[in-house]
Amino acid sequence: MAVSSPIREKNLNRPHESDRRLVLRLVPYLRRYPRLLLLSMGLLIPLAIAGAIQPLIIGQAVSLLRQESTWGFLKDFSIEQGIRWLSIILLITVIVRVICASFQGYLVQKMGQTITADIRKDLFTHVTSLGTSFFNRTPVGRLVTRLTSDVEALGDVFSSGAIGVLSDGIYILVIIVTMITVQAKLALMLVLMIIPVTGLIIYFQSQYRKANYKAREELSKLNSMLQENVAGINVVQLFRREAFNGELFRSINDKYRQSVDKTIFHDSAVSATLEWISLVAIAGVLWLGGIFIVDEAITFGTLSAFILYAQRLFNPLRQLADKFTMFQAGFTAIERISELMNEPIEIPEPEYNIHSFSSFRKQNTKGEIRFENVWFGYKEDEYVLKNLDFTIHPGEKIALVGPTGAGKSSIIRLLCRLYDPSKGRILIDGVDIRDISKTELRRYVGVILQESFLFAGDVMRNITLGEDYCFERVQEAAKITNIERFIEELPQGYQTQVRERGTNLSGGQKQLLAFARVAIRNPRVLVLDEATSSLDVKTEALIQDALEHLLTNRTAIIIAHRLSTIRDVDRILVLKQGELFESGTHQELLKKGGLYSDLYKLQMMGYEGMINSE
């Protein structure tokens, strides 16, 4: 279902950046490839000169056939010889243009694709560095649109537009200078016709840009809804939402089509205007040129050259207009990409990385965790954790218990630094986690979630996650977590391909892989967030055996709704509405007769009811 995006809302409430500022954002990428840029621009000069003298050559051929005044060197030749030499010169200019245009086109495309890849890489790196809160409020479809179609639109600016506009501009300038040297009055008439055309192009392009931005926003909505329906296809089909969602999709699709229609209208208006003006220009040249011929001010050859110039002057203008359309789409893409690149990284790396990973691991191996007066809220002044102050001692096994919404998962998110506390601080072995790099921290703290996410790829890669572990380490981790036998039974063993999101594995098998993923990293602190709640009895038995190995000599934090599974932990922290309500062992809390006792009795009553009903 399409929802409003904070990026879009923020953009609608601020003025658009000027084209100049947007272009300057691309300069750092162009500077990476100075040789390609200079060579591409250098080829523009022979390309423009060869194109500008071709009408003159044809005009000289007409003058030669009519025995009018021609270039000096042609006077020594017969008509047949003169035509032959002019044909050779014309062929040379054609060859020069073909060679230069082909080579330049290759260089420009190469540079454009390279820069596009650089931008896509930088954008992906930035997006994956953003905080969890950004992804919670931003639809995936919008991010996909910006990483794909917006970057491609920007790539078109580099690969076809930027150098192309410069080429057309130089070509027009060379033609104007050549025309002025041949016949200033005819040249002035054509130049004056360019002025209103330029004004019309600027107007239609500004309208095109507005329409294009709207069209891309509608495309983002379309992609968001498509992604949501594919991800939630089971719910869509089970609750017979096909028709209802189809109607919603049709509505968004129509809005997108209408937005695209507006861009087509403004683009077509530019082409139609240029077509009409170019015909008027040719008619004007014939009219004024005819008067000059009658007055014997010019020759038929000069008139023929100017008719070709009238065509060639407006052809690059038409191409320039097409490229400006591409530029407007590119500027829209730059705006949207810049909005994403300007999103602040909410959880920054420490300014001074005091503790390298190796030194932190060597110097801090106790696993003590201390929350000092920690307050936290996902929204300002709406705290879900309030004044938490407790210490988890090295090697201690702690359980977090409380009703839904008590703040258990928020504590884990803070410990892993997916968020930073609003107030207070969190220390690991006496070091504020904000002074530890995220890489170090997340190696030191291993987390196993209730639902594991698997990547498309082989089993071994899903355990190593791209890090450089030898095969023996992978086997050892699999053995510790009781998954070795399962992996060896797979068709290709550790090289067996896992489908996207692990759809060819059972829930228990995916969870066992998650345990192996953590075991191979040998964390000092282990966090289990409902890690065994959705497993069958046989798999849970394997997991419990694996846990005995994993929890040895490690500090552990366990979140569990089934209170019967945490009887043997060293201490239970009971949370209520974000505050630490009770603390003690299982037996101590039962004797208190407080919140934990009530929760435990309710669960036992429910469990006994299930037994009796069977």
Image (cartoon, rainbow, N blue to C red):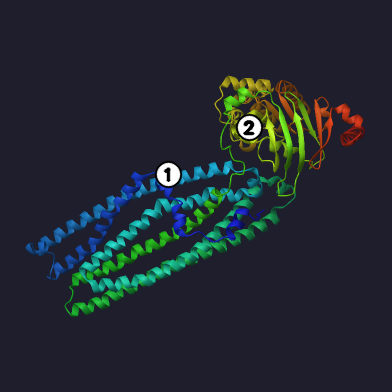
Tell whether label 1 touches label 2 (CB within 8 Å).
no
Quarter occupied by residue 180: bottom left
Q: Secondary structure at mark 1?
A: helix
Rounded to the nearest angstrom, the CA distance separating label 2 from label 1 is 33 Å
**Label drawn at residue 442:** 2
What residue lies at 27% left-to-right and 55% top-to-bottom? 45
Residue 267 percent location from the top left of the image: 46, 64
Q: Nearer the viewer, mark 2 or mark 1?
A: 2
Residue annotated with mark 1: 114
Looking at the image, residue 39 sits to the left or right of residue 296; the answer is: right
Residue type at mark 2 is Arg
Looking at the image, residue 575 sits to the left or right of residue 220; the answer is: right
Q: Give above or below for 319 relative to 570.
A: below
Residue type at mark 1 is Thr
**Label drawn at residue 420:** none
Q: Quadrant of the C terminus?
A: top right
Mark 1 Cα shell of 10 Å, populated few (<14), some (14-19), many (≥20): some
Residue 139 percent location from the top left of the image: 63, 50
Residue 528 percent location from the top left of the image: 73, 31
Quarter occupied by residue 523: top right
Mark 2 Cα shell of 10 Å, populated few (<14), some (14-19), many (≥20): some
Q: Nearer the viewer, residue 598 or 470?
A: 598
Q: Nearer the viewer, residue 114 or 272?
A: 114
